[in-house]
Amino acid sequence: MALIDLQNISKQYDTKVILKDANFTLQSGQRVAVIGQNGQGKSTLFKIIMRLVEPDSGEISIDRSVKIEMLDQQPKFKANLSVRDAIENQLVELKSAKLEYEKITNELMTNYEDENLLRRQSDLASFLEFHNAWDLDNMIERVLVEFQLKQYEFKDVNLLSGGEQRRVSLAGLILKKPDILLLDEPTNHLDVYMVEFLEELLLKNNFTLLFISHDRYFIDNIATNVVEVEGGELRRFNGGYSSYLEQKAQILSNMQKEHENLLRLVKQEAHWMQHGVTARRKRNERRKAEYFDLKQKAKTNPAAIKKMSIELQREQKSFNSEEKQQNKKKMLYELDNIHKTLGDKELIKDFTTRILQKDTIAIVGPNGSGKSTLLKIFMEKMKIDKGSFKKGDFQIAYFDQQREMLDDDKTIMEIFCPNGGDRVVLDDGRNMHVFGYLKNFLFPKEYLDKKVGVLSGGEKNRVALALLFTKRVDCMILDEPTNDLDIPTINILEEYLQNFQGALIFVSHDRYFVDKIAKKLFVFTGNGHIMESFQPYSEYLQIEKELKELDNLEVEIQKEKTSVKVVNEPKKQTKLSYKDQREYDSLPNELEELEAKIEELNSCLADPKCYEKIGIVTLSKELEEKKAIYEEKVERFLTLEELVESFNS
């Protein structure tokens, strides 16, 4: 039975249809990614499941026994609460269950026949096992470290930034492990190392998950299914993001074949209309009506096919397509042994590099390592402490998460045409109508007169990016450009960036985006060191992971060598000790007695007269204890016997 079952769900806001007769199910253990353009209904689907919004029609069936939790975009915490307390507050039920389990275990030491206690102990053990709560304190420590919250452990959570607060909330939810977890853009504000840790927890602990994400690698690594929200419909695909693309390509191929068949049928019916209608029979009238329906469908199909085809082509372009010709390269930046320290933290140490006209560089590394500081140095908003920094004579366009280039009081039309008119000149010299250009960034015509201040965060980002590509510049510097963007918009951004003729320097945590755009990496490796790499980012991370595993293996091997050395140091033993010899002599009799007792207990459990008198629980408990003792003594006897044989050989 499905944990969540939505049937024929419809929802409309004013005249805009969000969902129409949509169906959705979620089974235990599934991890479903919800994708689609902003405003298509992804968040509405979440709100309907959480019962924050009621559908206009349809049936909602949610298993009453399951607990559903959702990661809020802007989590709220009680006053005067530390980061650690905020996490532990979400784990009250788990901690209470663990305390109760320990209490019952102690009670069973003296009252081991109490069936109610045994049953409750078993239920609690299953609950704690499901939530991976046996080692909760150590898991809290690990999450604090991996999500870079350890330094804020005892700081008031309400004093943290929005991104840090989301990490606190996410940490608590992951440890709590509700029956169903809903996550809206969980990888926002996480660096790649945090994302990999999150992936590890979600996969290892078998979460049932419904999540919205623009991080395509995250979707590919985590999702068992992808649900695309488009035109009020929910279309489901098996597998992760790469499987979604393959299945979408197959759907497109089928649509094209069906359209070809439809055109043939329309031609046949058109011939019949011209030559075959001889009377106004009902059958003929019905066939005429069907012909006009087919003709209308044949007109509308190409637009849908073309739209899907363009979206797929954007996504399926070669990740590392090389330019056929490279222009003569011009020096933009030259850095020689630069240093930068903030407070007592050395962010950049002995960094030397050159950046040329055609370079596309991703700056990557953990949060707080110095990525944004390096961007500010390139922007000349921050000075270096030591070394040489040279910048050529060229024009820069800058995009940041604060969208400083936008005026909330102006309409979109005023932003793009400040001097009036309705034309806009792009960075490549093309002159376009504003609507024709903004249509590429998924804005409908009615948005031209909207003020920037009323737009959502994602819509503002789209405006800022569209404005960016109207500037004639030699270098673009971008700080987390994919944040708050849906996947179709990221595809458009990637297309524009790949066609840009200048240099690109950007910070991003989106591994897929970095792989697709960057030709070079500046990797913050720790302690202020920056390494240049020409590998794809995903390949670099994989190699780094394998090297760490090798380091850990070497440590283990060294431990084993040390252990072996210690074992070999004592003088070689030639006979059993007095104590071991007595144990070796007595073990055969003890094993015979245990075998007899085990046989007796098994016989009693097979005889109703016997087990009704003593009790099945008591007999079963004693049998398990005797079996455990028997196995332990057999193992000990074999160990001693091996020693005796080695002395005699």
Image (cartoon, rainbow, N blue to C red):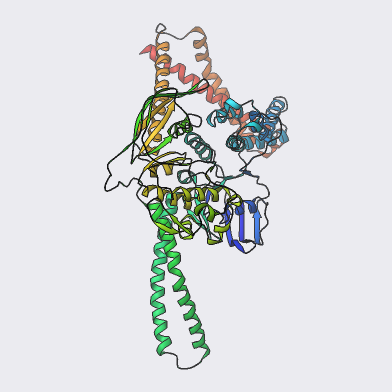
Q: How many marks?
A: 0
Q: Find residue 278 and report its horizontal and vertical position in percent.
A: 45, 93
Q: Nearer the viewer, residue 27 or 285?
A: 285
Q: Is residue 610 visible?
A: no
Position of residue 210 measured from the top left corner of the image (x, y, whole percent): 56, 48
Which image quarter is the C terminus in? top left
What residue is rendered at 47% in x and 81% in y? 291
Lateral position of residue 563 relative to residue 173, left or right? left
**Left of 30 or right of it: where is 61?**
right
Which of these two is toward me, 112 or 170? Answer: 170
On the question of residue 147 being in view, the answer is yes
Which residue ends up furthest to the front in the rendered image?
419
Compared across the picture, whether 328 is left or right of 560 comes to left
Q: Is residue 259 above or below residue 500?
A: below
Q: Give 592 or 521, whichever is nearer the viewer.
A: 521
Instruction: Tell me residue 528's x, y (percent).
Output: 44, 24
Which residue is pictured at 29% across the width and 40% down the height? 329
Q: Residue furthest top?
A: 571
Q: Nearer the viewer, residue 632 or 129?
A: 129
Dividing the picture into quadrants, the one containing residue 566 is top left
Look at the picture and state if 587 lies above or below 599: above
Residue drawn at point x = 43 percent, y = 33 percent = 378
